[in-house]
Amino acid sequence: MTAQAEAAPPSPAGPWLGVDLGLVRVGLAVSDPDRLLAMPLATLPRADLSVEALAGALAAVAAERQAVRVVVGVPWNMDGSAGPRALEALAVAEALRAAGTPCAAQDERLTTVEAETLLRAAGRTAKRQRPVVDQAAAVIILQAALDAARR
């Protein structure tokens, strides 16, 4: 697998769910049904969830939001190789697929840094960023996937 986003087959009409697997929190974003715009949705506590438990929680949110695809951000290393966090994200994506939830992986290198920069520019202090930075990163991940799908 390369550092590029996975090619995903066309999906039926409906929103997509974006996921940023942070170390402490999981950021979620959702698109509009026409898949033009990604919006922040929620932040889930990460706790010590197994890959299967995490996939189950994400599948439940996807079903609740009637999402037709889940886009999981994969934090590839800067050289394109897969470290432990990237392997975990890929395992979550695979667990979602195995459970019948359409899923794609999206390169998410530096999205948290980008999200922190955007939040800081919007006037959020580091302390006020913490609860929403993973949501903001999920928005960036999902918007990149939406934009790529339209090309």
Image: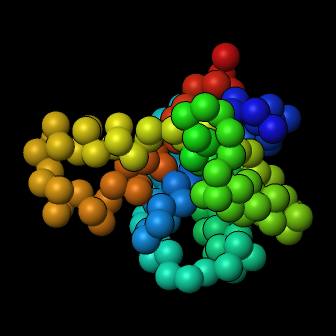
Tell me: 132 left or right of 36: left
Which residue is found at the position 17% from the left and 43% from the top? 120
Residue positioned 43% across, 71% down in the render = 24
Relative to 143, is 74 on the left or the right?
right
Residue 18 on image: x %, y % = 57, 50
Quadrant hosting residue 110? top left
Residue at coordinates 39% horizontally, 46% vertically from top-left? 112
> Which quadrant holds the C terminus?
top right
Residue 106 appears in the figure: no
Q: Horizontal placement of 70 versus 36: left or right?
A: right
Vertical arrangement, residue 40 with respect to residue 58, above or below: above
On screen, residue 128 above or below 40: below
Q: Residue at x 76, y 33 (%)?
A: 2
Position of the N terminus by quadrant: top right
State the residue in front, 84 or 58: 84
Residue at the farthest top position:
151
- Which x, y percent locates residue 136? 38, 49
